Image (spheres, grey):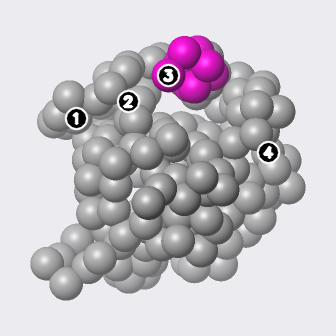
Amino acid sequence: MPNTSARKAVFLDRDGVLIRSDIRDGRPYAITSASDMEILPGVHDAAAQLKAAGFFLVVVTNQPDVVDGSLSRETVETVNAALANELGIDDFRVCYEKESPQSRCYKPKPGMILDAAHDHNLDVTKSYMVGDRWRDIGAGKNAGCYSIFIDCGYSEQPPEAPDATASSLLEAARIILAHATNG
């Protein structure tokens, strides 16, 4: 029997969706200093619109550079705290692992989404995943979310069959709000 009291959420990738990524050779990389954090245009408005519509906002982010030492956990947490403060993000789920068969959280595996859904009584079937890479869309699909790809034109494999494509989080928010109203 479905849990009718479960809430709807928007799961958001962090780098490239909320903040500007460091792009090298057409590929995105996480910033390595909190002072380099730059919230992308339209993100404040998008977050405010989604919150006003009753969505629980959860950032789900792979941060494997912490394992090899090229990024500090403190930097990740400082950036996340700033985003929580500025955007009203409700929860952060961070995978500090490298991709491996043993990892449950490294996107495209859905572990971060499913854990947040369990902990916060979220209905993944009424929720959305927004990301700028194929791994994000895969995680959303694997969790049962409606998945929206923000196409940043990276030189890497495209996602497999996103439910929608947008050019920014603000456009993705418009898609979510229209889909949630009509869906």
Which is nearer the N-term, disc 3 or disc 4? 4
Instruction: Measure how far apart labels 3 and 4 are at the Cα level.
Output: 26 Å
Instruction: Measure how far apart labels 4 and 2 are at the Cα level.
Output: 20 Å
Which is nearer the N-term, disc 1 or disc 4? 4
Asked if the residue at tag 1 contacts the one at tag 3, i.e. Cβ–Cβ closer than 8 Å, the answer is: no
177 inside magenta stretch = yes
The span shown in magenta is 175-183
Q: Which residue is mark 3?
A: 183
Instruction: Measure how far apart labels 1 and 4 are at the Cα level.
Output: 27 Å
Percent position of residue 164, x then y: 37, 21
Q: Residue at x 82, y 33 (%)?
A: 52
79 inside magenta stretch = no
Q: Which residue is mark 4?
A: 87
Q: Amino acid at mark 1?
A: Pro
Q: Residue at x 65, y 78 (%)?
A: 74
Percent position of residue 61, x then y: 48, 60
Q: Is residue 28 visible?
A: no
Q: Residues within 10 Å of mark 4 (few under 14, many from 20)?
A: some
Which is nearer the N-term, disc 2 or disc 3? 2
Which is nearer the N-term, disc 4 or disc 2? 4
Q: Which residue is mark 1?
A: 159
Q: Residue at x 27, y 53 (%)?
A: 142
